Amino acid sequence: MFSGIIEAVGAIRVREGGSGDERIWIDSGKLDLSDVATGDSIAVAGVCVSVVARDDAGFAADLSRETLSVTTLGEAAPGTRVNLEKALALGARVGGHLVSGHVDGVGRVVRLEPDGRSTRVEFELDPALSRFVAAKGSIAIDGVSLTVNRVAGVRFDVNLIPLTLAETTLAGLAAGDGVNVEVDLMARYAARWSETQGEEAR
């Protein structure tokens, strides 16, 4: 599990192709890897990956065909900057919200506009995913824990405060960009519970 509070911004160094899957090497920037071992989890742009190797500059992770197909990592070229967060330690403070690192889908940036010292960003989601998004609820965008301002159909918007813009990759967003989206865990389970209640009533 993760908190959605980004610890560092890294970059994809190289991609090594496989038979449908890939290994990527990531330069970890200022992320402290001294306590990271093979098999540990790190969120890369919101995607939970397992560390399979390390070197002085960063770490490697294997990406399955599924991960490549449902996240932005499938098309991320070497040099692409990525948000990084190590898995939570038991008892750690959760500053954002509980994030699993299991991306639900890719959303698209519709528009950005200044809003005081912040930037308001509107996103669009697939209808099957947008039903899990609620005003004032939590959402993770490229691994960043954010609060939803408002929802209108398949679109929703958030505010990016100066600290978020300075410490994450979200400052580089532009209209049309794809982002990894993970809806709030409670919303997903509440929806499933509601569905099962309807099934039992029939």
Image (spheres, rainbow, N blue to C red):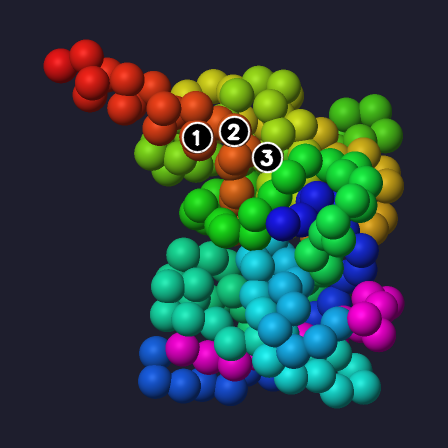
What are the residue bounds of the magenta stretch? 21-35
- Image coords of residue 117 (percent x, y): 86, 30
Residue under numbered circle 1 = 189
Q: Earlier in the sequence, mark 1 or mark 3?
A: 3
68 falls in the magenta region: no
Q: Are marks 3 and 2 in contact (CB under 8 Å)?
A: no
Return the mark for residue 174.
none
Q: Is residue 64 left or right of residue 81?
A: left
Q: Earlier in the sequence, mark 3 or mark 2?
A: 3
1 vs 3, front mark: 1
Could you say whether the residue bearing mark 2 is in a helix, strand or loop? helix
State the separation of the CA atoms marked 3 and 2. Answer: 11 Å
* Near-viewer residue (112 or 160): 160
**Three-letter residue code for mark 3:** Ile
Residue under numbered circle 2 = 186
Return the mark for residue 139.
3
Could you say whether the residue bearing mark 1 is in a helix, strand or loop? helix
